[in-house]
Image (cartoon, coloured by chain):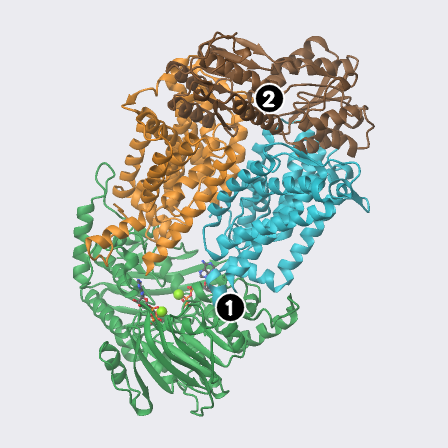
Chain colours: A green, B brown, C cyan, D orange
Amino acid sequence: MSQAILKVEGITKTFPGVKALDNVSFDIRPGEVHALVGENGAGKSTLMKTLAGLHRCDGGEIFYQGAPLSLSGPLDARRKGILLIHQELSLSPELSVAENIYLGAWQTNRFGMLKKRELRRNATTALEALGCGFGPDVRLGTLSVAMQQMVEIARAEAFSANVVIFDEPTASLTDSEKDQLFQTIRGLKARGVGIVYISHKMDEIFDITDRITVLRDGQVQGTVDTADTDLNQITRMMIGRTLDAYFVKAKAEFGDEVLRVEGLSKRGLFSDASFSVRQGEVLGLYGLVGAGRSELVETVFGVRRADAGRLFWKGREIDWPTPRQSIDMGMALVPESRKEQGLVLMMGGRENTSLPHLRRFSDLTVMNRAREMAVYEKYRSALSIKTTGPDQAVSQLSGGNQQKFVLAKWLCAEPGLIILDEPTRGIDVGSKSAIHELIADLAEQGLAVIVISSEMPEVLGVSHRVLAMSEGSIVAEFKGDAMTEEHLIDSVSHAREPVAAE
Amino acid sequence: QEAPDWLGGELKKPLSETRIGITVLYPGSNAYQAKYAETAESYSEELGIQATVMDPQGDPAVQFNQIQDMASQRLDALVVWPTSQNALIPAIRNASRSDIPVITSNSPIGEAGRRYVVAHTGPDDCAQAEQAAEMLGDALGGEGDIVVVEGTPGYSVSILRKNCFLDKLADEYPDVTILASQTAEWNREKAQTVMETYLTQFGDEIDGVYAFDDGMGLGVISALQGAGKEPGEVKVVTCNQFGEGWDAMKAGWHSGSNKQSPVDDAILAIQTAVKVANGIEVPEMQGIDTPKVLPENVDEFDRPTW
Amino acid sequence: MRRHGLIIAFLVFLVGVAVNASAFLTPGNIMDVLRQVSITGLMAVGVTFVVLTGRLDLSVGSLLTLLTVIVVDQHNVVGPFPAIMMTLLAGACIGAFNGVLVGFVGLNALIVTLAMLSFLQGLVLFYSGGSNVNVENAQATWFAVFGRGTFLGLPVPVVIFLLGALIAGLVLQFTSFGRKVYGVGGNETASIFSGIDARWTVFWTYVISGLATGVAAIVMGSRVMGAQNTIGQGYELTVLAGIILGGTSLLGGSGSIWRTVIGISMLGFIQNGLLLLGFPYYVQWLVTWVIIIIAVWIDLGAKRGRIFA
Amino acid sequence: MSLTSTDIRSGSHLRIGLSWLLRNHIWVFLALTVAVFSLASPYFLTANNIGNILTQGAFIGILAIGMTMVMIDGEIDLSVGATLALASALAIGLQTHIGIWPAVFVGLLSGAALGFLNGTLVALSGMHSFIVTLGGLIGIRGLVFVYTGENALMVPDFSYTEIPEIYLGPISMTAIIFFGLAFFFQWILSSTRHGRETYAVGDNIEAAHDAGINVKRHKIINFTLCGTLAAVCGILLSMRLGTAEPNAGRIWELWTIIAVVLGGTRLQGGFGSMWMTIGGVLTLAVLRNGLRLLNTPNYVELMVMGAVLILALVLDKLLKRQEAT
Ligand SMILES: Nc1ncnc2c1ncn2[C@@H]1O[C@H](COP(=O)(O)OP(=O)(O)OP(=O)(O)O)[C@@H](O)[C@H]1O
Ligand SMILES: Nc1ncnc2c1ncn2[C@@H]1O[C@H](COP(=O)(O)OP(=O)(O)OP(=O)(O)O)[C@@H](O)[C@H]1O
Ligand SMILES: [Mg+2]
Ligand SMILES: [Mg+2]
């Protein structure tokens, strides 16, 4: 293999109270896709932010194209050819696509005026190179998440990057969008660009990467060639043990119907959705991003109002509930965005856990701290959440641990129906399989479970029955042997033609 | 139409077609201003003239705009109670240049602008402050330690009531010492707060208090009562007596103030404006009386209704 | 140390002034200061609820004026007890009106309460016709007790203030309503997903703010035994400055009542201390400026573990 | 035209027009108020009165330009009223010592310096600008009093007040300066690097920072601009009044914020323009002038202003909801 384009030697980074990176060394070669994997909070994002000039490391050295690299900031890194595509998109919705591609690096003439024409032209070139279906003048806020991500990737073209870092790029992409992304990555690779690829999705890692570096608690566990390793070895390096099964399905013993929805419609979002779910059943809801699944379940839960439709809870028809009523009835919704919808970031785990059930944790409105602590402790250890204490602000936790608190806050209500919207997005394999086991457990305890996922193996792996949703309509239902990847893809890609349910 | 007696000339046009603009403000002592405005309105109605009364809310720039707007309506005369001695000079100059006569009421504008003003009417703030100095000096027998409670700083009334008082005191009562001087922003409650702090700080050293108006004077008296003082133990002198101040004086808490009638003030201003609107000569300066009100002669005055 | 940086800074200031002005730290003066801050303090306690939800209430100054005028004027008409009830009711209603506009209609709080500031100022002038109002039988009414009385040797305003602060503090720390206030302030969407009706929570904080201003107006009316239509002017800024000085975040979700009490007392002691040292009042403004910047900065720096952002 | 966006779902011209209107509804509001007052008062639609409105609006307008820059950044500046008072005091007070134009220059400099101070404090400390500038609102007023010694300062020579007495028809120099500055800053916003950065910073500060925009320096620049514009306003005011009042500009910051928000610029940043601000400023000026022409009592004016503001917010809300569906 050729000389490394970027080489990290012994870097260390400490945050108050956490040693995020501990003597980390690794390298990136031109034309390779180098995977970085590890549990939540292992330090992957921190390492990459250090390379992209967003963090300054406390010790160690970085060599870029053979020479020691010192970065004055993120723009400096981009100009030098190191581009980070963030875990959370890093764009400005009110600006145009072209302006976003060159965000912060706009060319100006002598008078400080933007060279708008040049900006447009260059942006168009970059967008065309990626085969994007939109122009440079569109306001970014009107694009879908996948399209926005393409805008970030267009920066790689625009700055002719030598190193491109993807931090969990597929977290909010559908399979077809993912395929498109992979094509783009292969294109970059062919041009000799060194690529770092961070993901929790192991199939992707084995699909696209050449080498894998495993990080654990801020330390490098080792670097291996992808061709020479297997899932078990990587898993063991990541979490110190192997997993026997990646997907567990609950025993199919169904009880009474818990929820039935008939003809639910909301103009512009979804129409005529009908389904039901029984005790002990795991119902999968599959669809492409933007299919309207989140909106559908949010409406059922009462965060949004429907235009039409009927709702039956345990056989009785009920009025459209408010979230409060839904919770009291025994419904729980684990929302898809933990930071916006799931957690009060400056509160600790304890207060977040009890937030939906204040009445249960209070006597005549006075909070009962002991009861709160007991429940908090139970679910913290059950989900093995890493914190320094019940009042540590959850904003200080890694994404995965945050996600576990979102789960904790809903599980502690012991609901009759739990709806999980992308429950494993951004969660490491270890925790992911823990969540899958949990889903199975819950179902076996008699809960009804609805799982929304854009990951086909997951939705097939955990559900007893799968609904496919496309452009706001439930287009197909699969169970038993009919639950195959081919059927699912088939159903959602023929958007308008309803597929016969099997 | 018959011309009223006080006019001293012929009406050029009927009173019902005479249009007068009035912009009044007396920062803080809104009771006085309210009575003034009320009188201005009721008296205009009585005369049958068209009058507009505006409040610049203490902001000279707003008053500036008001004068501009009234000038553009081509009123027959403007009555301006200036919020600032000098800031309105350009506005008044412009009005006078477009042949709209301006009368200042209650407080005069600065020297530089006098030539754009047809006449000035009203009490003399400076004279009142000097009276206050005399009353306090006399009440203390020419010597003692006093504290001062000021109005909102920066307005012409405050400036006159401060400087004229200080000058008079320095000239005629050199043995009266000023311990401290603080603003209470024409606010009764803040005056009470300021006085309480003085009492903590100086205790029994304080022999007298000068407050710029009666509202703040009443706050001072509340503080004295709170501190367990006897009526008259500390001499309180203010400018411009209000109804409650009159009561306090009868009860012995108040040692001197002066009577200034918003009714007289407003009527004089409007009469002058009507004269000017009809092209009748008026004296450049017309004052209203502000007699001293002292515990000795308080019964000679009616209780003020403001 | 981190949590108490504020208190330490405050103590340093107190000692500094006391060394230079002997009257400063006498029990009498401390009581005076507490009495003087009791009105703004009561308002600040109410507004703290609003600020904790990440919103503002700039209308409290005008509201204080209106309510003081109402309580004093109605005292002469219907007597003290009904007047007090009317004042509290009026305060709660106007708070509720703000609450509907901000909580339910979802309008921007800064602008709504700014508009309300103007509107209430107009209402005061309309109600009073511009003139001052006074309690007619000032000597004979028990109404005087709120502003002038003492209870167990403490001035009643101070007792009301501290009692109000205590109740408010307990409500915020230990009740589910308090938790909702912090939840909505910390992350409104997440709170809605957790079944909290953010609209009602916000609504109630404004009602509390209006009620607290009502109590403050009663103390004010009783202390002054009269009202003029500028009496509460500018109080909204003092209240906000006190809350900010205490370190309660304007973004919502973090802060507390004890911080507000400290902040507002600090302002009172600054004002009083500089008066005692004989500085012109405008020096007090300069000092307030410097202290707000330094205190909030230190507080923020301690929270994030770094001085510079 | 809204220069910040191009609508991807653009359909017919009608739709574009409608969506333009939804994003610029202030102009509809302005037209409405103008229509009402024209009918109600014969003096309203006179060249002289229009001139007055423009001049009167220009002062808040100039403050509003700076405020718009800061607000698109997602910040706020409450200290502009006090800053303008200081600039006007310096411009007048120093005249006898150093001459008219040097004094004016020092006035401008003081505004720039205070803006710089605000910006630096916001950037370095990470405090919310509401807090920093609330402190400034209190403290800078103190500086004014220290300098003026509580007195209103008067110009030594009243010819100073004739400097802005240049008219283009009924339009005064002050109004021309306002419009000139507004156009200039609109150009800055839409066509310069700094302007686009302003949107980027206000819209998504993390993204702007991660993209290597020097967010701190950027904010300092905008606060400095805002302070300088406040000083411009203060100097024009001193030329208008011939006097520097220590209380000049009290609560003007509130009127300024009201004007900017009325225009449609968002307090949370990332969205807005000078066009909107001009609309807001004119609407406010028309309302205040019209009510005065109708001889409404003071309390009615206060109540109407409050009500209109709330109405405008409700309208904005309804239109946004309309736009969403
Ligand atoms: N700005 C910060 N301040 C303090 N601690 C931080 C900060 N950023 C990250 N950390 C901590 O550093 C550790 C590593 O975090 P990092 O985000 O790099 O994890 P990660 O491997 O990317 O996890 P995930 O897979 O969940 O994204 C975590 O313990 C996290 O809490
Ligand atoms: N960026 C966007 N701009 C405008 N509309 C969008 C955007 N993203 C989604 N939508 C619309 O919102 C609706 C549902 O989107 P959403 O992405 O929440 O669906 P989903 O099926 O829940 O997807 P997922 O849960 O995978 O994110 C669709 O009608 C889509 O057109
Ligand atoms: Mg990460
Ligand atoms: Mg969704």
* Residue A128: % across, % down: 16, 60
Q: Are marks 2 and 1 on the same chain?
A: no
Identify the secondary structure beneath mark 1. Answer: loop
Q: Quadrant of ligand 2?
A: bottom left
* Structural crowding at the residue carrying mark 1, measured as other residues with C-alpha within 10 Å and reported as few (<14), some (14–19) or many (≥20): many
Left or right of A41 in this view: B206: right
User: Compared with residue A252, is residue B270 higher up or lower down, i.e. above or below?
Assistant: above
Q: Is residue D124 visible?
A: no
User: Compared with residue B284, is residue D92 higher up or lower down, i.e. above or below?
Assistant: below
Residue occupied by mark 2: B158
Write down the chain letter for disc 1: C
Distance of mark 2 from mark 1, alpha carbons?
A: 57 Å
User: Compared with residue B157, is residue B223 higher up or lower down, i.e. above or below?
Assistant: below
Please tell me which residue is depicted at 25% across the width and 45% down the height of the picture. D1
Please tell me which residue is depicted at 32% across the width and 30% down the height of the picture. D45
* Residue B13: % across, % down: 42, 15
Q: Quadrant of residue A420?
A: bottom left
The residue type indicated by label 1 comes to: Gly
Left or right of B215 in this view: C50: left
* Structural crowding at the residue carrying mark 2, measured as other residues with C-alpha within 10 Å and reported as few (<14), some (14–19) or many (≥20): many
Left or right of D156 in this view: C238: right
* Residue A218: % across, % down: 44, 66
Q: Is residue A43 visible?
A: yes
Q: Which mark is residue C195?
A: 1
Identify the secondary structure beneath mark 2. Answer: helix
Q: Which mark is residue A279?
A: none
Please tell me which residue is depicted at 67% across the width and 20% down the height of the picture. B239
Write down the chain letter for disc 2: B
* Residue B276: % across, % down: 47, 12
